[in-house]
């Protein structure tokens, strides 16, 4: 480059004189920009002045929403049910901590473990297999599967899906039930018969769903509740709507599950020294779990208080003879019996002879 010599010459430009009257005929808008609301009426949908825009941001947690939206559109196009997208939010019943198996009615007996609810509009199901140990049937996730064995779960109508409530147990519990030592690892035992997804959710008091989605579920199922109702009243009304033949005692037992329900992460973090076992990348998520638990502690306390008051009224209606009957106080206008000496006697007034 040092030995090369470059020469630059000025390029001839042909200029034309603009007529004097032409400059005044150009409108001022040719040189100035129009306001955004006039030139770009839909700019508010593209540019947001808020700190948190209404569209999903390209974050590690937000990119799943884009995948879920594409899958919902694909399923709607394949089944020609575009109106079902409006109720795709029912997939909130497919969170992985629900401890249940789901299957679509009329598509065989294959059941799936809900592993995720992507974007709140659809879920992914892991196929389950059953094992027989001394006549007892247990379930566990199927091993050695391919990507094609996973199934997209679209809950557009809860009546189209069946579910089975489960309870995770260890090898020692399996030996206690069956009397046989079997190296199956953690398995699932049935916690009830196979029913509809709406009935299984109701018999588990809708797990830990907060008030906002519970109210949306109640309005969707046309349950007679008001928007100003408390979480306890909404859950109780939805349970009675799903299982109208419940007795009063069965309803009380179901509401007790909601009061005692907690996340498996809360139980783990409650152990002493559990946070020290986590890595630095996992402690951030653990802190988020603790913060969320503290945020919802007040709502859970309100639910517990309403449950206790309702339980007291329920017990009084069930056992009216066990109420403690206090002695009726005499009115001050009622003349008290006098003693033989003509004076008021406290003993004679309470226990007249």
Image (cartoon, rainbow, N blue to C red):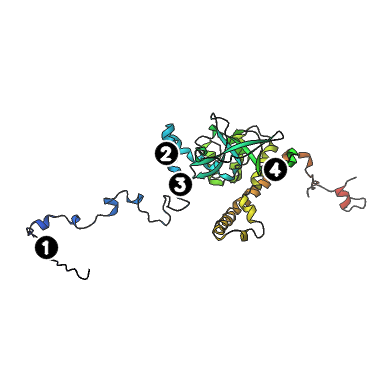
Quarter holding residue 317: top right
Q: Residues within 10 Å of mark 4 (few under 14, many from 20)?
A: few
Residue 124 seen in this snapshot: yes
Residue 65: assigned label: 3
Quadrant of the rendering where the C terminus is positioned: top right
Q: Front-most of 225 and 102?
A: 102
Residue depth check, mark 4 versus mark 3: number of the one nearer the observer: 3
Q: Which residue is mark 1?
A: 11
> Which labelled disc corresponds to residue 46?
none
First in sequence: mark 3 or mark 2?
A: 3
- Measured Cα–Cα span from mark 4 to mark 3: 45 Å
| Depth order, front residue of 309/35 | 35
Q: Is residue 310 above or below residue 341?
A: above
Q: How far apart are the two marked residues, 1 and 4, measured between alpha carbons?
A: 97 Å
Q: Earlier in the sequence, mark 4 or mark 2?
A: 2
User: Where is residue 184 shown, x and y percent of the image?
Assistant: 67, 42
Compute the Cα span from label 2 to label 1. Answer: 57 Å
Q: Give percent across and percent down for residue 275.
A: 61, 59
**Vertical side of 292 occupied by 84: above or below:** above
Q: In the image, which disc is placed on residue 313?
A: 4
The earlier-in-sequence mark between 2 and 1 is 1
Q: Residue furthest bottom?
A: 2
Label 2 or label 1, whichever lies nearer to me, is: 1
Question: Residue, x 59% and y 38% (percent of image)?
Answer: 128
Query: How far, Cα to Cα, is label 4 from label 2?
Result: 50 Å
Earlier sequence position, callout 1 versus callout 4: 1
Going by the image, does 312 lie left or right of 52? Answer: right
Determine whether the residue tagged by mark 4 lies in a helix, strand or loop. helix
- Residue annotated with mark 2: 73
């Amino acid at each position: 480059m040092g030995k090369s010599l470059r020469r630059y010459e000025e390029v001839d430009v042909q200029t034309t004189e603009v007529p004097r009257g032409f400059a005044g005929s150009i409108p001022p808008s040719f040189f100035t920009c129009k306001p955004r609301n006039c030139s770009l009426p839909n700019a508010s949908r593209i540019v947001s002045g808020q700190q948190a825009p209404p569209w999903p941001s390209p974050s590690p947690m937000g990119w799943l929403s884009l995948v879920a939206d594409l899958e919902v559109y694909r399923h709607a196009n394949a089944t020609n049910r575009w109106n079902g997208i409006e109720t795709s939010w029912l997939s909130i019943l497919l969170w992985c901590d629900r401890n249940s198996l789901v299957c679509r009615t009329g598509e065989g007996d294959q059941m799936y473990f809900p592993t995720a609810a992507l974007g709140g509009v659809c879920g992914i199901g892991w196929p389950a297999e059953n094992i027989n140990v001394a006549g007892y049937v247990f379930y566990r996730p199927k091993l050695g599967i391919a990507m094609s064995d996973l199934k997209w779960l679209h809950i557009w109508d809860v009546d189209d899906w069946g579910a089975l409530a489960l309870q995770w147990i260890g090898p020692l519990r399996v030996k206690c039930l069956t009397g046989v030592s079997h190296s199956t690892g953690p398995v699932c035992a049935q916690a009830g018969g196979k029913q509809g997804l709406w009935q299984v959710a109701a018999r588990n008091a809708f797990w830990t769903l907060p008030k906002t989605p519970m109210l949306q579920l109640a309005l969707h199922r046309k349950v007679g509740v008001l928007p100003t109702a408390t979480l306890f009243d909404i859950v109780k009304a939805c349970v009675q709507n799903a299982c109208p033949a419940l007795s009063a005692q069965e309803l009380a037992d179901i509401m007790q599950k909601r009061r005692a329900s907690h996340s498996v992460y809360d139980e783990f973090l409650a152990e002493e020294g559990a946070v020290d076992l986590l890595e630095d990348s996992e402690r951030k998520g653990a802190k988020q779990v603790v913060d969320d638990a503290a945020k919802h502690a007040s709502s859970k306390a309100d639910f517990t208080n309403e449950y206790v008051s309702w339980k007291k009224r329920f017990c009084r209606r069930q056992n009216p003879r066990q109420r403690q009957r206090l002695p009726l106080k005499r009115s001050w206008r009622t003349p008290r019996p006098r003693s033989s000496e003509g004076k008021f006697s406290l003993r004679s007034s309470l226990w007249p002879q």
